[in-house]
Amino acid sequence: MSHSFNAYALVKQAIAQLEEKLLKRTVRINERACNVDALVGGRVLKTFCSNDYLGFANHPALVAALSEGAQEHGVGSGASHLISGHSRAHDLLENQLARLQSAHIPHARALFFSTGYLANLTAITSLIGLANKGEAHIYSAALNHASLIDGVRLASAQHQASVTVFDHLDLAELEGALIKDTSPLKLIVIDGVFSMDGDLAPLHQLLKLAEQYDALLMVDDAHGFGVLGENGHGILEHFALHSERLIYIGTLGKAAGVSGAFICAEDSFIEWVIQKGRPYIYTTATPPAIAHTVSKSLNLIEGIEGKARRKHLNELIKLWNQEMAFSSWEKIHSLTAIQPIIIGSNANALLASKLLDEAGYWIPAIRPPTVPEGKARLRVTFSANHTMDDVKKLIEVLQKIESSMLVGDAA
Ligand SMILES: *Cc1c(COP(=O)(O)O)cnc(C)c1O
C-alpha cells in the first residue's frame, strides 16, 4: 500500500522551512498579570510590546467589576445572542458604545462582539452581502490588519466582489480607481491607526472621497479607541468627523484593557448585521460579566483617570520622539503609542530582540507576513503605566544595542 499523502511529514517539513528562514514564532509564558513588568522563564522583563495603552488590563476597579459581573451573571452566556445569550449587561454596553460615537455617526447603534477579528469579518461580509453578485467593489488599504484582509477575502469569495488594494499614502491612486468605478456598492476599508507603523489614516481626505464617489468608509480603530480624542472616543473624535457613511469598529482588548469589540454604524445597518452576519449569529455570546467589565472600563476611559492616563501616555510619546535617534536603524515617524523601529532583515531584528531580552526588555521582532519582506522591525509600544524614566532607560539600551550590532557588522 502506498502512502501518497503524509500530512504530518509535510507539517514537520514546513515548520523546518520556517525555522530556516527565521520565521518560526514562539509562544512565551508570562507568569504575571498584564502590566509593564512580566515574569518570563524566572526573569522579570520590562515590556514595551503590549497594546494595554492605558494600563487598564490589571486595573483594580476592573478586576473587581469582573468578579462582580460573574456574581451577578455567572460565567457563561449559554447561547448565541439571537437564542438566549443576550443579557442586560450586553444591552447596556451596546447603548454606551453607541453613545460614544453618536457625535460622529447619525442614528448610531453598536453591536458587541467577542473579538475584533470576528467584528471585522462580520462587518465586511454583511455589508458586501447587500449587493448582487459581482456588484460590489472593495478598496482595501495595503497595510490593513489581517482580520480586515480576511474579511475582504471572505466577502470577495462569497459575493464575487472586486477588490482594489491601495496605498493609504497615495490617495491619488485611490481616486483614480474610484472615478472609473460604476459598481453600485463601494466600500473603503482601512485601519484608523496602522498597527505595525503607528501612523493615522488620512480620514478627512478618505471621507471626502467616499462622499464624492458615493462609497462607504469602514474604519478599524483597534489602536485608537480609548487613546485618541479628548474623551478617548477614538479616531472619529480625534478628526471630528461626522457622516452617515462611516462604519466604525473599535476593539476592547487593547486600550480598554478587557476583551471584545464592536461595530458602530447607522442603526439600520446594525439591524442587517443582526439578521445576516454569520460570525455574529453562529457564535456563543461573550460572557455578560465581560460586557459588565467593559462598561466599567468605558467609564474610566471617559473619566478623569482616562484623561490623566492619556496625558501621561502622550508625554512618554513626546519624550521618545524628542530623544530617540538611530544611526542605521529607521525610526518610523509616529505620534501614537506604536513606535516601530525598522531593522530590515529577520536575522538582525531577531538579534536586536534577543539583545534586548538579555538587557531585561521584552520587545519581540515583528517579521513577515505581519510586515512586508525586508521590513522586519521592533514594535515598541507605550503604556500609561510606564514612567518617563522607563522610556529614558529604554532609549539608552536601544542606542547601545544598535552600536554593538554595527560593530558586529564591521567585524
Ligand atoms: C488587534 C487588532 C484587531 C483584532 O482585534 P481582537 O479583538 O484582538 O481580535 C483588529 N484590527 C486591528 C487593526 C488590530 O490591531
Image: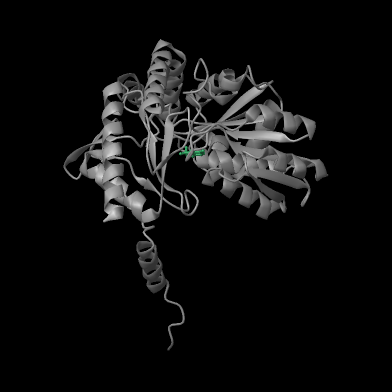
Relative to 280, residue 389 above or below: above
Quadrant where the image shows the N terminus: bottom left
Along the line of sight, the residue nearer the viewer: 4 or 290: 4
Residue at 73% of width from left, 28% of height from top? 208
Residue 152, percent from left and from top: 63, 47
Picture quadrant where residue 245 is located: top right
Left or right of residue 143, residue 290 in this image: left
Work out which residue is located at the far left of the displayed protein and give it. Answer: 42
Residue at 47% of width from left, 23% of height from top? 226
- Observer able to see residue 89: yes
Residue 71, percent from left and from top: 34, 24
Relative to 21, residue 216 above or below: above
- Observer able to see residue 79: no
The number of discs equals 0
Relative to 392, residue 157 above or below: below
Along the line of sight, the residue nearer the viewer: 137 or 83: 137
Residue 249, percent from left and from top: 57, 32
Residue at 39% of width from left, 62% of height from top? 21
Work out which residue is located at the far top of the displayed protein and give it. Answer: 304
Along the line of sight, the residue nearer the viewer: 166 or 38: 166
